[in-house]
Amino acid sequence: MYRLSIPSSGHISPRLNHKILDVALLRQWFCSIGTTKSDANPDAITGLSVLSESLKGCSRIALLGIGSELRGDDSAGILLVRELGRMVKKSPFSHLGFEGFEGGSAPENATGFIKRFKPSHIVIVDAADISLAAGEHREIDPAEISDITFSTHTLPMKIITEYLKQATGATISIIGVQPENLDFGRPPTEALLRGVRRLSEQLYEIMCECDLRIGALAPASH
């Protein structure tokens, strides 16, 4: 299993007082550093409104990508961890703790690393048949888990989420990405790759907001 660790400190931006600056303007500036405006969908962020709400009290986010790189679009979760990891490495968060984990086809192997990270929130991304166009995504309510076909991995999603909840006490969110082709030996489709880029941008923007909220609550330095 490959584990991707992204530092959460050392932002290259100037030192700013989040209590004084307008948060909306600061958010626009901060998030523009790591996103590609030409690919961004300004309306797509509303598709993760529940996730945005659930992450409001976050301090440390673990991103778990699930799937197999040997089965085309089944690699959605793995590709998402790498893409978002590159964005965070380019423009690290100043306050938010973040770490990405590639769970592969045996995500249970990553649970020990996630537990040691001590996340306040865990976001799980996996290819899933959610009856959308290829590459599109949506949040999945825990009550839906039994009715949705996820990518091939050794343990059911329900068991993975229940264990992580019990082991970490973290708030858990699940995002499904619609695959187009899961044939063995095939590369991911263009639709899937475009979808992963869009989702990465959305998640980065949400995490930027979390980072700003944490900074606004932090004691002002003198």
Image (spheres, grey):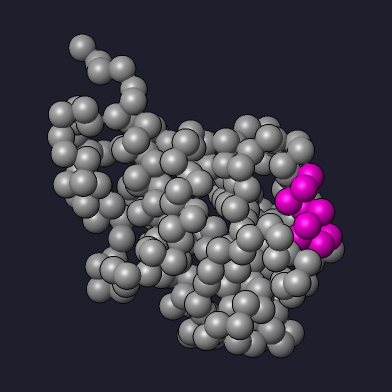
**What stretch of residues is rendered in magenta?**
155-163
- 204 over 130 or under it: above or below: above
Q: Is residue 162 magenta?
A: yes
Q: Residue at x 50, y 77 (%)?
A: 136
Does 185 sit left or right of 94 as displayed?
Answer: right
- 185 over 151 or under it: above or below: below
Q: Residue at x 75, y 72 (%)?
A: 147
Q: Is residue 187 visible?
A: no
Question: x, y percentage for residue 214?
Answer: 37, 32
Of residue 90 and residue 160, the one placed in the foreground of this image is 160
Q: Is residue 201 magenta?
A: no
- 62 over 179 or under it: above or below: above
Q: Residue at x 74, y 85 (%)?
A: 184
Q: Residue at x 21, y 12 (%)?
A: 222
Q: Is residue 124 visible?
A: yes
Which quadrant does the N terminus fall into?
Answer: bottom right
Does 95 sit left or right of 42 as displayed?
Answer: right
- The image quadrant of residue 158 is bottom right
Name, please, the residue furthest toward the right.
Answer: 154
- Count the numbered circles shown: 0
Q: Main secondary structure of the magenta part?
A: helix
